[in-house]
Amino acid sequence: MKRHILVGILLTLFSTMHAQKPIVMPLWENESEATLYIYPARQPNGMAIICCPGGGYSHLSMEHEGTDMANWFNTQGITLAVLKYRMPNGHKHIPLTDACQAIQIIHQHTEDWHIDSKKIGIMGASAGGHLAASLANLAPQELRPAFQILLYPVITMTDADTHKGSQKSLLGESPSAEDIKHYSLEQQVNPLTPPAFIALSSDDKAVPPTNSLNYAIELGKTGIPYTLHVYPTGGHGWGFRDSFTYKRQWTDELEKWLREIKL
């Protein structure tokens, strides 16, 4: 067996066998649903990532798109905070409000968890990728993350390319043209948008790959650094699952990108 494959298997086993208990922190007083699950790195390098699991804005895939990644990031010296955000339920602003509060909480605890305030990033998969990219493009400047990591993200709300379930859950049955434009994040890229790492499969039947491709094009037009990895198979929703054929590829590429990113 090749050495790098063996190392990858051992790292996966380490991640699953040595999971630490998180610090559980409610986002709001008198609100029990929105919660941050924080996994501080034992040997921190100053970096932190807030992770937004997917689920079509109707539920959350907390494990394979969130907590299962904790020890993997921790071994890199990165503190991971998995965000259990509230579903819109007719109030489209709620998920982004929770994401903004989450990054504020991380900023308030930088000394406690040995985090550099300039190295706090956002990550999301599927609809969680839409939330992550919303924070990256729509949040006030002081709450923008330093970088964004998007796995097979929902980006657009336009009818031609959106994920219909996410669109309906976030914007309702008959969204206005104004809301569609505002939450179509390829149309919201701006000079304050942070660098992006994007990974997806070209055979994704749930969220059209054009979501990621069009977003990357707009990042490039605006001069925002990005890296884009498109794998030939895998479909949608693979997250940190070992069953995804290209797991070692995307995780290795992300590890390298995080080591080399200029913040």
Image (cartoon, rainbow, N blue to C red):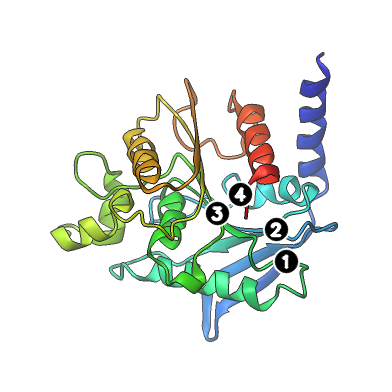
Of callouts 3 and 2, which one flags the residue occurring earlier in the amino acid sequence? 2
Label 3 packing within 10 angstroms: few (<14), some (14-19), many (20+): many
- Residue 34 visible? The answer is no
The kind of residue tagged 1 is Ile
The type of residue carrying mark 2 is Met
| Left or right: 174, with 105 as reference point | left
How many numbered badges does the structure rendering display? 4
Q: Nearer the viewer, mark 4 or mark 2?
A: 2
Q: Amino acid at mark 3?
A: Phe
Sequence-wise, which precedes: disc 3 or disc 4?
Answer: 4
Compute the Cα span from label 3 to label 2. Answer: 11 Å
Q: Is residue 210 visible in the rendered structure shown here?
A: yes
Mark 3 touches mark 4? (CB < 8 Å): no
Residue drawn at x 34%, y 70% is 93
Q: Pointer 2: what residue?
A: 47
Pointer 2 with pointer 1, Cβ within 8 A: yes
Horizontal and vertical percent for residue 231?
50, 24
Q: Quadrant of the C terminus?
A: bottom right
Task: Name the spot of residue 103 as percent of width and height, x first.
Answer: 56, 69
Q: What is the secondary structure assignment of the residue under circle 3?
A: loop
Q: CA distance from mark 1 to mark 4?
A: 24 Å
Is residue 134 left or right of 162 when viewed as pictured? right
* Residue at image location 53% in from the left, 62% down from the top: 145
Which comes before the other along the chain, label 1 or label 3? 1
Q: Which residue is mark 1?
A: 115
Q: Which residue is mark 3?
A: 147
Label 2 or label 1, whichever comes before in sequence order: 2
Residue shown at the point (45%, 59%) measured from the top left: 136
Q: Which residue occupies the extreme bottom position in the image? A: 30
- Three-letter code for the amino acid on which mark 4 is drawn: Glu
Report, in whole angstroms, how far the alpha carbon at label 2 lies from the one at label 1: 6 Å
